[in-house]
Amino acid sequence: MNGARSLVDTLLRCGVDTCFANPGTSEMHFVAALDESARMRCVLGLQENVVTGMADGYWRIAGKPACTLLHCGPGLANGLANLHNARRARSGIVNIVGDQASWHRPHDAPLTADTDALARTVSAWVRTSTRSGHVGRDAAGAVQAARTFPGQIATLILPSDASWDAGGSVAQPLAVPPPPAIDPFAVESAARALRSGGGKVLVLLAGRAVQAEGQALAWRIASATGARLLADYVNAHVARGRGRLQLERVPYNTDLAIAALAGFDHIVLVGAKAPVGFFAYPGKPSIQYPPQAQLHLLARPEQDGVAALRALVEALGAPEVALPEAGPRPGIAAGAPTPEALAQTLAALLPEHAIVSDESISYGRGFYHHTHAAPAHDWLHLAGGAIGDGMPVATGAAIAGGGRRVVNLQADGSAMYSLQSLWTQARERLPVTTVLIDNRRYNILIGEFKDVGATPGPTAMRMLDLGDPALDWVALAKGMGVEAARATTMEQCADLMAKSFRQDGPFLIDLVV
């Protein structure tokens, strides 16, 4: 057995059965080993940032890691932006990165890079297998690290001689450590603030706390104490729709966030960080909460927020209480496209247990309010701010979803970062509906000009304009093998959306706004 075969067999034994790949010469023995195993699903991405984004979306829905296959340091570098997003989303991923043979590396061949240094910018665990006999052991360690709560990126660097040399052996899965225990003193501190806060207490939720069980526990706490509930702005995965809490997020805009948080004397953090601005702005504070507000750290992101909420419910004696009704499901909107009309139409048509991958950027900041009454669904957000994850995350989520409909709400500028995702959707025949929000500009940056106090002139505006020449999204999608059509009204958008939901494969709606 060579090292590559021991790697594949160890990954499978550890429960990793999906590989998102963009391989090169150094990884050919690993590719050959994949070919010998029918149990590993291999999915090709045409650019590494698509590969890493797919692995992120897969984790968010499957709850277990996939592996990536990347070609040397430059291939890893191409995938770093979506690994940054995955790190912020706390997704578990096992990166397999090929490298020069150990005895060839000193010759400084063209693709030689400091792969270890690149990997450490996004990884919680990095190791280089120095010989074939270590590959299985190292792979088991990588999976253990990726599964460590709430999810981590682990990168295994595989020199090609460690892959092709004989001497490999399959390793057993390693036990995954439990999350750090919840501090009972933190529970009592939060309970004391909630009892005496006079309604001026915010419970800020993130991580597992915004899944269905966490929401139900948080609502018991809020109902018993009069506290307010909000979700962190950058939650990677939120359970939404009927039967879930009508949570809103801390606003993105610094002024709006400061106003939303101004009335709170206490903020209980459950898997969330204290709210700060996405960016700094002249004359505005970095922190968005009142300076005099007292922070109560109930659960750090690496702790189990649901366990923390359960302990807080018990400390407060908060009784069970039904979640508020979402109200009637909205009807399809008519007329010209607007953010409100798109959200309303999505809520009217969304299938049960769908998945929404939201990279609508500035256009979609108000989508939550108009989609609470949709059927139960999962909503995936861009967690790290590096644009270009919406399409790959949708693709990986569809592979994990087992036939569930995925709706990708996608800004046009961001879509150009990872357009190749459409090709993978077509090849894998994935049920992904992309609603391409076609405003032909980087609209978020036009707003940022105002917020930083700068005045854009013709040169600046040209750098934010995508309309000269206009991108033909219908042609681009069809060129990738995805059926597509253009909509200029909400009636057309609704018809195309409903049509796409009846089909098995991918579909792109070019919604001109």
Image: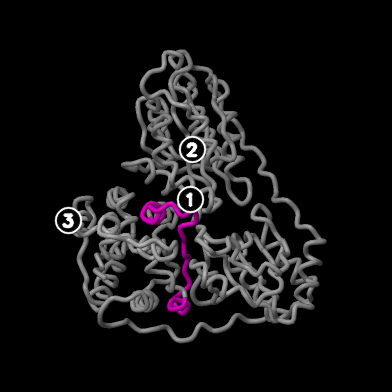
Residue bearing mark 2:
95
Quarter-of-image position of residue 354: bottom left
Quadrant occupied by the C terminus: bottom left
Estimate the x, y position of residue 356 in percent, counting from the top left: 42, 64
Say left or right for 313 vs 53.
right
Nearer the observer: mark 2 or 1; the answer is 1
Residue at (46% x, 13% y) in the render: 103
Nearer the observer: mark 3 or 2; the answer is 3
Colouring used for the render: one colour
Q: Amino acid at mark 2?
A: Asn
Estimate the x, y position of residue 450 in percent, counting from the top left: 40, 66
Residue bearing mark 1:
85
* Residue stretch rendered in magenta on the structure: 369-394
Estimate the x, y position of residue 303 in percent, counting from the top left: 68, 55
Residue at (61% x, 61% y) in the render: 208
Residue 22 vertical position relative to residue 248 in the rendered view, above or below? above
Residue bearing mark 3:
469
Quarter-of-image position of residue 297: bottom right
Query: What is the CA distance from the residue labelled 2 to the residue labelled 1?
Result: 15 Å
Q: Amino acid at mark 3?
A: Pro
